Image (spheres, rainbow, N blue to C red):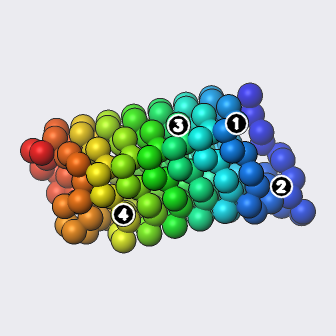
Amino acid sequence: MALHGWMAGDKKGSMKTGIVLRGVDLSGVDLSGLYLMNAILSRADLSEAKLSSAYLFGAYLCRTNLRGADLSWADLREADMEGANLYDAKLHGADLRKANLQEVDMRGADLREADLRDTQLMGTDLRGADLRDARVTPESLGQVASLMSAFLPDGSRGEG
């Protein structure tokens, strides 16, 4: 299922800002490149969804299931994703600056080249995640629950 071509005003491939899709099942749906600024997608099922290059600035994604979703190169600045499931998600090159990723399951996530500056990571599980070449402050990494077996920005492996 693909949602390409949705219209919001005169913008092809976009939705209105602030759209509410709370609790919906969009698992496996192709939402690549869509404009979803300030969208409310809390408790939605977006597992295996394709959201590459999507604009999700300020989106509310608390407790959303994004397991295995492709968010490569997505703009998630200032998104609230507290308690979300991002297990095995693809976030290569994603912009997560100032996002709330507290208590998020990011085990096995691909965060290569992602921008995590000023991101809240308190209690986040990054076991087995790939953070090579990611931009993240040591202070943020110090807040995570676990970095066991994760590839760190400098290419070393996390221990705990």
Image point (90%, 63%), residue name: 9
Where does the image place residue 54, in percent across and percent down from the top left? 62, 53
As drawn, is 10 to the left or to the right of 43?
A: right
Dot 4 surroundings within 10 Å: few (below 14), some, or many (20 or more)?
A: many
Q: CA distance from mark 4 to mark 3?
A: 19 Å
Residue at label 2? Answer: 12
Mark 3 touches mark 1? (CB < 8 Å): no
Q: Amino acid at mark 4?
A: Gln
Residue at label 3? Answer: 65
Image point (72%, 45%), residue name: 21
On the question of residue 137 being in view, the answer is yes
Task: Give the number of marks.
Answer: 4
Residue at label 4? Answer: 120
As drawn, is 56 to the left or to the right of 108?
A: right
Question: Dividing the image into 4 quarters, which one contains the N terminus?
Answer: top right
Residue at label 1? Answer: 24
Of the two numbered discs 4 and 1 on the same chain, state the one appearing first in sequence.
1
Where does the image place residue 51, in percent across and percent down from the top left? 60, 44
Badge 1 element = loop
Residue nearest the observer in this picture, 123 or 46: 123
Image point (78%, 42%), residue name: 4
Dot 3 surroundings within 10 Å: few (below 14), some, or many (20 or more)?
A: many
Q: CA distance from mark 2 to mark 1?
A: 23 Å
Of the two numbered discs 2 and 1 on the same chain, state the one appearing first in sequence.
2
Q: Nearer the viewer, mark 2 or mark 4?
A: 4
